[in-house]
Image (spheres, rainbow, N blue to C red):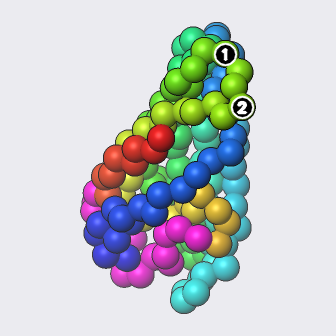
Amino acid sequence: MEPGSQAQMNPYFSAINYNLPKDTLMLMLLPDFQIARTGPNFLTGMIMDEYGVTDRLTVGVMAEGEKINGLPATYGGLRFNAYFRVFPDDHFLNFTLYGEFEDLNAAALYKMEIAGFGGEDLEGSLREAQRTPLRTFEPNH
């Protein structure tokens, strides 16, 4: 995987208003088995922690890692996000502003948006991939 290959993100529309109620904590474990295009198959996983700061603002942090057959378990990095619901009351369309900062490395293989889409297989040295930063900011509205 080349550094920066994940930097170009496609825009998308979300039909889900994702904010959590004030003082609500959500913890999720997101495991995923992936069949590699080349090389050994692998498991990826993410721990997601989100908190409702207000009824309109939710902040979160996600930590991810992977286990490739024949290699040690590997830390892939962190993602920090925030959701802000524009209108305080329910409307036909509830607009939500979203931002996500990804502080990952090139060993990060978790496919977050849709299973089957996202990062490529790890090619090359795992040690080198862990030292290669992949940082992006993903704004959506």
Q: Amino acid at mark 2?
A: Phe
Q: Quadrant of the N terminus?
A: bottom left
The span picked out in magenta is 117-133
Secondary structure of residue under mark 1: loop
Q: Quadrant of residue 128?
A: bottom left
Q: Is residue 3 above or below residue 78?
A: below
List x then y, in percent, for residue 67.
Answer: 58, 64
List x then y, in percent, for residue 2.
Answer: 31, 75
The residue lying toward the viewer, choosing from 91 and 78, is: 91
Horizontal placement of 30 versus 137: left or right?
Answer: right
List x then y, in percent, for residue 133.
Answer: 28, 57
The residue lying toward the viewer, choosing from 115 and 11, is: 11
Residue at x 40%, y 48% (from the top left corner): 138
Which residue was labeled with disc 1? 89
Evaluate whether residue 122 shows in this view.
yes
Q: Are marks 2 and 1 in contact (CB under 8 Å)?
A: no
Evaluate whether residue 100 shows in this view.
no
Q: Quadrant of residue 96?
A: top right
- C-alpha span from label 2 to label 1: 10 Å
Q: Amino acid at mark 1?
A: Asp
Which residue was labeled with disc 2? 92
Secondary structure of residue under mark 2: loop
Q: Is residue 80 above or below residue 36?
A: above
Is 121 covered by the magenta stretch?
yes
